[in-house]
Image (tube, rainbow, N blue to C red):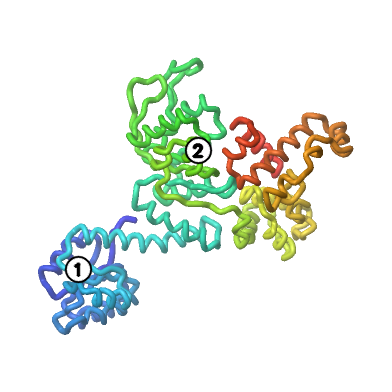
Amino acid sequence: MILKNLNMMVVEDDDLQRLALTQNLQNLGNFYEATSKKEALQHIKDHKQFDLVFLDLDLIDGDLLGLELIRPALETGAYVVVLSGRQEDESIMTAYKNGCHDYLCKPFNKKSLELVLTKFTMAQSKGELRDFLARDYITRDPELMKSLEIINDIKLSNEPVLLSGPTGTGKSYLAKLIHQILFKTEERFMELNCSEIPENLLESELFGYEKGAFSGAETSKKGKLLLADGGSLFLDEVATMSELLQQKLLKAIEEKRFFPLGSEKPVSSNFRLISATCEDLGQLVREKKFREDLYFRIEGFKIHLKPLSKRSSDVELLLKHFSKQTQRRIVFTPEAKESLKKYYWPGNIRELQKLVNKLSIKSQGIINENDLPENVRLNNHPCLGEPAPTSESQATSAPEGEVFGLSENQLAFVEKNGLRTFLQNIENKTVNHFYRRNNEKVRQTLGQLKISNSSFYKILNRIKAQLT
């Protein structure tokens, strides 16, 4: 937030102190001066609205009269700062109890004034952030809304941002919103999903390359690091990055310069880093599967997005939001809404959006409970066909012999649909089973399944596609 065109008032009977304040504030907008309670009240009556008000406690017309001006100043919508030579706890406590936002002890310096202006900026931004979230980010969850208030701090610092939470909770969407808040534009937002690109290609996508750097490099190409110069670089699923690439990324983040592949000349790029992961990076660091130095470099401001199953109050809001985005409008009966609230949404917000898109194609515009997919009505996952286990013992309670035995129905399925489709279904069910049991921790799931990163995400993407 740029401080300009502010309406300010300085109530101070010491000519030197008043002059020092007005000189520091004169470039920020209009200011009015007062040396007494009477003059201050007249300014409030004449102008009715102030952004910043500085009040001396000990005015010439009476001790601690400044305290009596705090409430009238607050009623103008002002951020009120008390100025006083009194440093005893009782005076400070009384001023804060009367409602002032800050208390500066005389003589104050430029640094303390800058701190006040920073806090004023943050206070103003909270209102802007509430409006922004009400307009662009759909939630009524108190815990999530509180965690999103950190965006105010992000605006005042160049520290990186780390978003965490299960897949489908909207980390990519939030990253774009943060970029728009920071830069007031959708441009210069570079996004790269580290899990969707093979390791050998990920490096060239990040750093770029020179012509002839490798076989097939017929022209030079700028990497995402350079394209994000003056904007944001969003690295999704950063935990899947190899250790070698983690090391190169760390160096690029710290120095804000790097070498494109095949180049002997470094290039510079000043970007805001936003990372996202569905895994517990702290746990991966402890397991020596993610570099500790990179973790401490990218964690910066942390925002955790809860799964939709723990934000049931948001389901109805999201239903309305996604329904408005379809060309054909639909409405949900109370019974249908209740079923949707009880469903545990393994695909989170992404799954809900796809369901609304599906239902909008139905012939009738009123969606009853019976119109919902069976897995939603029964609170089942569509790929497993059974409710999520409530404990690990339940998840592993099937007799060992039944794991490998094929039922008559399964054999009939193979005969009708083929072995490949059957095996894909088995992969889907198995991956989903362990993934959910492990609270969507990828590394832990990979260790139990003993499959590669690429195989896991291939199956996971196939599962997500079934929801479309």
How many callouts does the rendering have?
Answer: 2
Q: CA distance from mark 1 to mark 2?
A: 50 Å
In the image, what residue occupies the spot 63% across and 34% down?
A: 456
In the image, what residue occupies the spot 63% across and 59% down?
A: 315
In the image, what residue occupies the spot 61% across and 51% down?
A: 349
User: Could you tell me residue 231's position as x and y percent?
Assistant: 40, 41
User: Could you tell me residue 390's position as x and y percent?
Assistant: 69, 53
Q: Quadrant of residue 55?
A: bottom left
Residue under label 1: 105
- In the image, taking residue 218 as reference, residue 337 lies left or right, namely right
User: Is 175 placed above or below 50 here?
Assistant: above
Q: Quadrant of residue 245?
A: top left
Query: Which disc is residue 287 wearing?
Result: 2
The one of 61 and 198 positioned closer to us in this rendering: 198
User: Could you tell me residue 351's position as x and y percent?
Assistant: 65, 48
In the image, what residue occupies the spot 42% across and 22% down?
A: 261
The answer to whether residue 185 of the structure is visible from this angle is: yes
User: Is 112 placed above or below 285 here?
Assistant: below
Give amino acid for label 2: Glu
The one of 254 and 189 positioned closer to us in this rendering: 254
Q: Marks 1 and 2: which is nearer the front?
A: 2
Q: Secondary structure at mark 2?
A: loop
Q: Secondary structure at mark 1?
A: strand
User: Is 240 placed above or below 139 here?
Assistant: above
